[in-house]
Amino acid sequence: MAVSFLNREVSDLCLGKPALKLIPAKATVSEALTLLKKSGETHVSVWSCDHIRKVVEEGGGGDSVCCCIGKICMVDVICFLCKEENLADPSKALQTPVEQILPKGNSIVRHLDPNSSLLEAIDYILEGAQNLVIPIQNYKSTPSRKKLLSKASFLTPTNHNGVEYCWLTQEDIVRFLLNSIGVFSPMPTFSIESLNIINHDMMTVSYHDPAISSLDAIIRAYVEQSSVAVVDEDNRLIGEISPFTLAYCDETVAAAITTLSAGDLMTYIDYGGPPEDLIELVKMRLQEKKLRAMVELIDEEFSLSSSSSSASSCSSDDESGSSKVTVLGRYSSARRSEAITCYPWSSLVAVMIQALAHRANSIWVMDEDHNLIGVVTFKGILKVFRSIANAKGKPEKENTSKQ
């Protein structure tokens, strides 16, 4: 029963998914920023007609189609601006074509046919994909499903040759599995330790270390869909720097990473926007480094944010007297920088529920003395479900060979 469930078509997961918002590969980083902020999306798909796929037949030239070559989010922009030459001239950096800042050599976005199985989707993710691009029109389906998909794809006018696309994330697939978790009983009740999905190769940074020292770890965490643990002198977990949280921030976080400690960076990117005193500290340190252009970028960004939210902030100012800058929109959707934790004896289903409830791609694992010992990711969870098909599939292959 579990194997037949895993052989379901991925089109079942596309119901109600909105059509992708896209940006051409030749567009500038500045244009991508504008689209991210206006759309409220955390990621925007990047499409190219230069990477043409030819369907070549005997004696014919074939047809060419555009394809999705990646995705861009605020994490890409922030890490790009953290480079020394870009900090000195962010305006020039923002005119860089989007295709030049996409991760090289990592197929984090893959095209998948809607008739492909859930197992194939899981295999792509285990190979490193973060998003699976799937057509949501013009494929075989029941009339009722077509009607539903038609409504979903109407949300954006974007299409390629009359076909619109959605994408599936690791979170989408884990949520789909959780909704039918009984099919896999009793495996979901087993501990994460017994299932061997605790990854002990963690990325950490000390609370008092410069945040810039964690930049490589942040980039790696983004690719691996994990987070960077912020720890104290005894390696006790204090919080985390999560790419998911950074995706809801703005480009000024590049300045914060450059000038603040890891601990202060957690406060800067926390839900609701950075405190005024930290903004002033960042600006002061930028001045000391003679990075005046970044100071101007911060002033411009927060003046726009404060002017757009001034009407909404009047009542809250009277109540709290908080020194936090009132930033609506992206920061208001972000998850807090506090770390989500579990234990080796926690069940798989409990960890899945916890991760999905907190919209966390990774959960930190603590021992009985509250020491940090590892991390569980969506990718690790999906390995468990893939192993079911492997275990069930071997006897079938043996029987076939005997016949």
Image (cartoon, rainbow, N blue to C red):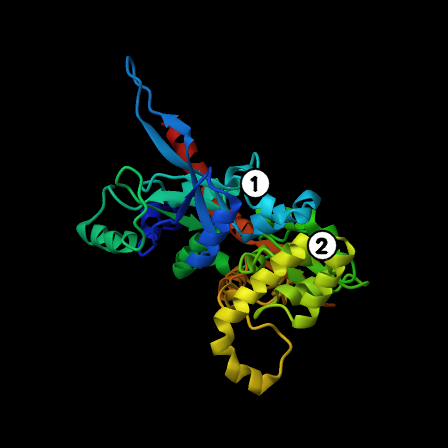
Q: Quadrant of residue 117?
A: top left
The disc placed on residue 101 is 1
- Residue placed farthest to the right in the image? 233
Q: Quadrant of residue 246?
A: bottom right
Q: Would residue 150 be found to the left or right of residue 67 on screen?
A: left
Residue 92 in the image, given as x and y percentages of width and height: 60, 44
Identify whether 240 is placed above or below 2: below
Residue 388 in the image, given as x and y percentages of width and height: 47, 47
Tell me if residue 265 can be seen.
yes
The disc placed on residue 258 is 2
Query: What amino acid is labelled 1 in the image?
Result: Ile
Number of dots carrying numbers:
2
Residue drawn at x 49%, y 62% is 356
Q: Would residue 310 be found to the left or right of residue 91 on screen?
A: left
Q: Would residue 361 be found to the left or right of residue 145 on screen?
A: right
Mark 2 element type: helix
Residue drawn at x 25%, y 56% is 151
Q: How far apart are the alpha carbons under marks 2 and 1? A: 19 Å
How packed is label 1: few (under 14 Cα within 10 Å), some, or many (20 or more)? some
Identify whether 286 is placed above or below 64: below
Identify whether 161 is placed above or below 273: above
Q: Quadrant of residue 53?
A: top left
